[in-house]
Amino acid sequence: MKLDRLLGILTILLQNDRVTAPWLADRFEVSRRTIGRDIDALCMAGIPIVTHQGGGGGISILDGYKLDKSILTADELTGIIAALKGIGTVSDSSQIERTLDKLSASKDTVISLQAPIVIDLASNYKGTLTPKITQIKQAILDQKLIEFDYYYEKGITHRRIEPYFVIFQWSAWYVFGFCLEKQDWRLFKLARLWELKTCDELYFQRAIPEDRKDFNAYLPDDKILLAVFEPSARYQLMEEYGKDSFTEREDGKLLAEIGYTIKEHIISWLLGFGDKVKVLEPKELADEVKQKAINIIKNYS
């Protein structure tokens, strides 16, 4: 931690004309005496630091002293900063801030923390998501089993797994690991995962087969929906599946051909269109959507 703090102090001094010891102490959550010892350590390392007494005083680096920061280009730094800020939306913000302090550019360069790309990996359940990610990440580092209750279309199940990766894909967060119950590799969605516990039991990492590293294979869209949508649904089709997912018929309606994975999910999605869609194929899917609509009517009769 001392090395991290020394690097942080050095970076701040390179970015600012002058800072005060109380400000540094508050920034790094240590005492002013500790900051004084850190400044002495930097001086002993050959960094020309000077202190100014009285009003307007503070700590600064001798004029003319510079570090070569040309290892990364401006575009590379911008990309790193954007990525770090994205990770910061679902992780320990103080850790990300310390890293950004080290990477952010000085006043004589064009790079700043105001990166032109904003990445927000959080969601409306961020309050529970961040602790889950932190706990699973630590379990992976410690090579400890985790267990949890998992909610899915058939109900609820309890699982114990060897965790290997926390993954953000398909607009959601998952944990990938070896399920002890199924004796196979599985992907679990964090939003459905509750009562998470880290076990005392350790595990030895297995070699992950190459074909199991293709995470897209866990959610194949090999089932095909053929449906007709009203023209007013165009923007929703564009948003979900892109402009190549449908063609416009002579009557103005939209004929869509869409791949899907889980039947329950596609039915819920279709019902969200109300009377703006008619399922053509597969027939069993059309029948289920029709029955759901009938059941909805019964609920209000």
Image: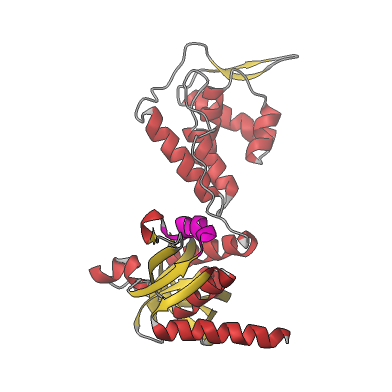
Residue under the point 70% across and 15% down: 53
Q: Nearer the viewer, residue 235 or 202?
A: 235
- Relative to 122, say whether 61 is above or below: above
Q: Nearer the viewer, residue 154 or 133?
A: 154
SS assignment for the magenta stretch, majority: helix
Which residue, as the protein is rendered here, is positioned at the far right? 55
Residue under the point 49% across and 25% down: 44
Q: Which residues are magenta?
A: 230-241
Which residue, as the protein is rendered here, is positioned at the far front? 251
Q: Position of residue 220 (x, y in %)?
A: 34, 72
Residue under the point 72% across and 15% down: 56
Residue under the point 50% across and 59% down: 231
- Relative to 63, say whether 72 is above or below: below
Q: Position of residue 222 (x, y in %)?
A: 32, 74
Which residue, as the protein is rendered here, is positioned at the far top? 64
Image quarter where the C terminus lies is bottom right
Residue 262 part of the magenta-drawn span: no
- Relative to 151, say whether 54 is above or below: above
